[in-house]
Amino acid sequence: MNWRTFKLNNDYCIIHYPEKPNGFGVLIIGGEEQYVNGQDSNWLSNNNRHNILQSLIDDGYTVYYPNFNKNHMGNAPSVEQVTSLYEYIKRTEILNERIHIIAEGIGALIAMDLLKNKNEIIRSIAFINPIFSIQWLLNLIKDQPFLYKKTIQDIAKAFNISEEKCEKTIKTQEISRHQISYPFVIIHILEHGVQDAEWTQLYKKYLHDYNDQIYVMLPEKRSRIAYYTKKLFKKAEVQL
């Protein structure tokens, strides 16, 4: 696998090159599990992720992503870093300007921001166990006091506000129904125990218009992620 790391805004990013490029780029946006350093990344070191990455590269996709390695919660610096990375790749690589996105976990918060403010760069989005809003996240863990408190702390830190103000602000807001006007799929891996039941109920309640685009699967079937992702990408590439 041919890849290189580089620094952008004093943080590492990585780009993976296919042997036979198809002209399309894939931007991966994750959460605290996403890291890139000078020699490695979570998509290289984890076997399941590596297999998905390899499958995309084998089909000619140029794949790139930034380092996070922290609970960014979709804050302004994380959105700015992702946008800067897109602009850098646009300047330095020969790729179609409209990109595919893989958004995992709280990475979906950044993807939703891009949909709102930079939708002209998006071709399609594959969501993996997505968190569509801070309210969505807290709804999933509302019955787990220790995790709930820690998450409030993480959110407050990410947005540089007090925990009291953070919780008060969130409680005044409701989960909104999402309208996604670009080609997308949601792939949910059942690996979060009691949270999975609540998660799937949130899909039904707030994304009920998109049932045909939601795939729920057992962990041992996670290899299907590459299949559903590439199927989406190919369909979205019909019109350049």
Image (cartoon, helix red, strand yellow):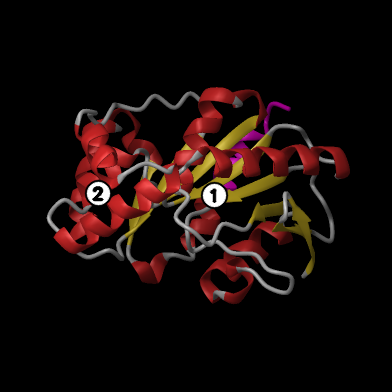
In which image quadrant can residue 71 be found? bottom left
Taking the image as drawn, is residue 231 in sight? yes
The local secondary structure at tag 2 comes to helix
Front-most of residues 149 and 86: 149
Q: CA distance from mark 1 to mark 2?
A: 20 Å
Q: Earlier in the sequence, mark 1 or mark 2?
A: 2
Front-most of residues 36 and 130: 36
The residue that label 1 is drawn on is 229
The dominant secondary structure in magenta is: helix
Give the percent coordinates (x, y) of residue 238: 67, 31
Point 51% across, 53% down: residue: 30
Point 63% across, 68% down: residue: 41
60 horizontally vs 187: left or right: right
The residue that label 2 is drawn on is 199
**Quadrant in which the N terminus appears:** bottom right
214 horizontally vs 229: left or right: left
Point 21% across, 34% down: residue: 205
Give the percent coordinates (x, y) of residue 204: 23, 37
Amino acid at dot 2: Trp
The local secondary structure at tag 1 comes to helix
Magenta segment? 230-240
**Quadrant in which the C terminus appears:** top right
Question: Does residue 95 show up magenta in the picture?
Answer: no
Taking the image as drawn, is residue 203 in sight? no
In this rendering, is residue 143 above or below 93?
below
Give the percent coordinates (x, y) of residue 113: 50, 32
Amino acid at dot 1: Thr
32 horizontally vs 35: left or right: left
Q: Are marks 1 and 2 in contact (CB under 8 Å)?
A: no
